[in-house]
Image (cartoon, rainbow, N blue to C red):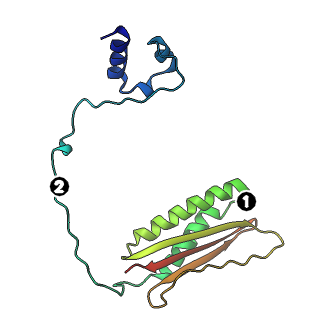
Amino acid sequence: MSDLAKEKARLLKKRGSLSSLGSHEVRAIGKTKDSISTLSYMEEHGHHDDIQRPTVQMENTYRITPSRRFPVLTVKDLLKDVLTSYLQEEKYETELCRQMTKTITEVVKARVKDLMIPRYKIIVVISIGQIKDQNIRMGSRCLWDDNHDNFSSHIFKNNSLFAAATVFGVYFE
């Protein structure tokens, strides 16, 4: 084994992978190319590799109606609470509102999922805009089952901005 290979092996054992080496360490072992391939190692095999788990066979429920309806009023109160807490004191700024839209969407989706409504797909749409002398009209389309699917929405306004939030609950058979 050459000295260069021994040095690489020693550094890999010390650090875990060649890509984690600093540029001065790579030059020190004689490799000056721009591209470095990553080589990782694992000293011990995990015990979880030896255990084979049985596959779980799920049975069809043949349920075509929901056991629990989409809670429109609960979700509306949730939307009102989240929008008010996040946007009450905010002023409209383009970059801030772009990030706030993503954050509020994730928070609303997580809180609706915490309600554990079985077999409903949750879709959250939030728009934040600046209040000036303009109007806005928003709409949405999708395949809809009037008997099972539902939605909840809330509009928030302060002196500087508005937010329109809608949560769709679409029953998944």
Check disc 1 and give the amino acid type.
Answer: Lys
How far is the residue under mark 2 from the one under mark 1? 54 Å
**Tag 2's secondary structure?**
loop
N-terminal label among 2 and 1: 2
Q: Which residue is drawn at 65% across and 79% down?
A: 139
Up/down of 142 relative to 107, above or below: below
114 with respect to 163 (left or right):
left
Kindly indicate the quadrant of the structure image that contains residue 83: bottom right
Q: Nearer the viewer, residue 78 or 123?
A: 123
Kindly indicate the quadrant of the structure image that contains residue 138: bottom right
Q: Which residue is drawn at 61% across and 78% down?
A: 140
Q: Which residue is drawn at 77% across and 68% down?
A: 131
Up/down of 114 relative to 12, above or below: below
Q: Which residue is drawn at 44% across and 82% down?
A: 70
Question: Could you say where residue 161 lies in the image, as x and y percent from the top left?
Answer: 72, 66
Up/down of 25 relative to 123, above or below: above
Q: Are marks 2 and 1 in contact (CB under 8 Å)?
A: no
Q: Which quadrant does the N terminus fall into?
A: top left
Q: Which quadrant does the C terminus fall into?
A: bottom left
Question: Could you say where residue 158 lies in the image, as x and y percent from the top left?
Answer: 71, 69
Q: Name the residue under label 2.
A: 53
Q: Name the residue under label 1.
A: 91
Check disc 2 and give the amino acid type.
Answer: Arg
